[in-house]
């Protein structure tokens, strides 16, 4: 009985599952992602040793897996990971928001203190002007 193996690969944040291939030499074919303009980011198999001219693009429609089952289980895993990442980002945003809120409160308290000092200074200047007969200090 012939056994087949499969692999899972992450591409652009998505996960794909494919059946491993053998090249014409009979060894497990290597897998790469195309960077060509004609086939950008397309998965392909090739002879790793370069002895045969085996070269074949991965076609998800020809896979022997139960795609519905795989998509369902994959979605659960991916959603869980995505939710974890979103929760971590949310914690980071909330920490940043806390820090910013503390800074805003500090700036507001400084603004109030500055306003009180200005009011105090203007009051003292007015008092001095009144006692000196209207001469200006500034």
Image (spheres, rainbow, N blue to C red):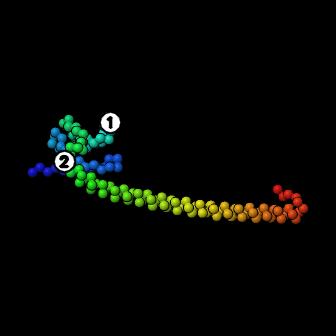
Q: Label 2's element?
A: loop
Q: Work out whether residue 7 can be spotted.
A: no
Q: Residue 138: image x %, image y %?
A: 82, 56
Across and down, in percent, residue 121 comes to 77, 63
Disc number for residue 64: 2
In terms of image quadrants, where is residue 76? Answer: bottom left
Q: Are marks 2 and 1 in contact (CB under 8 Å)?
A: no
Residue 80: image tag:
none
Crowdedness near tag 1: few (<14), some (14–19) or many (≥20) residues, C-alpha within 10 Å: few
Q: Is residue 133 rendered to the left or right of residue 105?
A: right
Seen at 44% across and 59% down, the residue is 90
Q: Nearer the viewer, residue 55 or 39?
A: 39
Helix or strand or loop: what does disc 1 sit on? loop
Q: Establish if 31 lies above or below 108.
A: above
- Tell us which disc is closer to us: 2 or 1: 2
At 75% across and 63% down in the image, what residue appears? Answer: 119
Number of residue marks: 2
Q: Earlier in the sequence, mark 2 or mark 1?
A: 1
Disc 1 marks which residue?
Answer: 36
- Quadrant of the image occupied by residue 60: top left
Provide residue 108's location: percent of width, then percent of height: 63, 62
Q: In this rendering, does residue 137 appear at all?
A: yes
């Amino acid at each position: 009985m012939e056994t087949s193996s499969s692999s899972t690969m992450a591409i652009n944040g998505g996960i794909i599952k494919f059946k491993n291939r053998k090249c014409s030499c009979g060894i497990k074919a290597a897998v790469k992602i195309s960077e060509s303009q004609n086939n950008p980011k397309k998965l392909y198999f090739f002879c790793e040793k370069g002895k045969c001219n085996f070269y074949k693009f991965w076609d998800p429609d020809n896979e022997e897996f139960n795609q519905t089952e795989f998509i369902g289980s994959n979605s659960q895993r991916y959603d869980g990971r995505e939710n974890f990442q979103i929760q971590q980002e949310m914690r980071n945003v909330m920490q940043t928001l806390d820090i910013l809120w503390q800074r805003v409160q500090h700036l507001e308290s400084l603004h109030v203190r500055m306003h009180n000092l200005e009011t105090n200074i203007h009051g003292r200047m007015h008092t001095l002007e009144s006692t000196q007969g209207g001469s200006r200090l500034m």
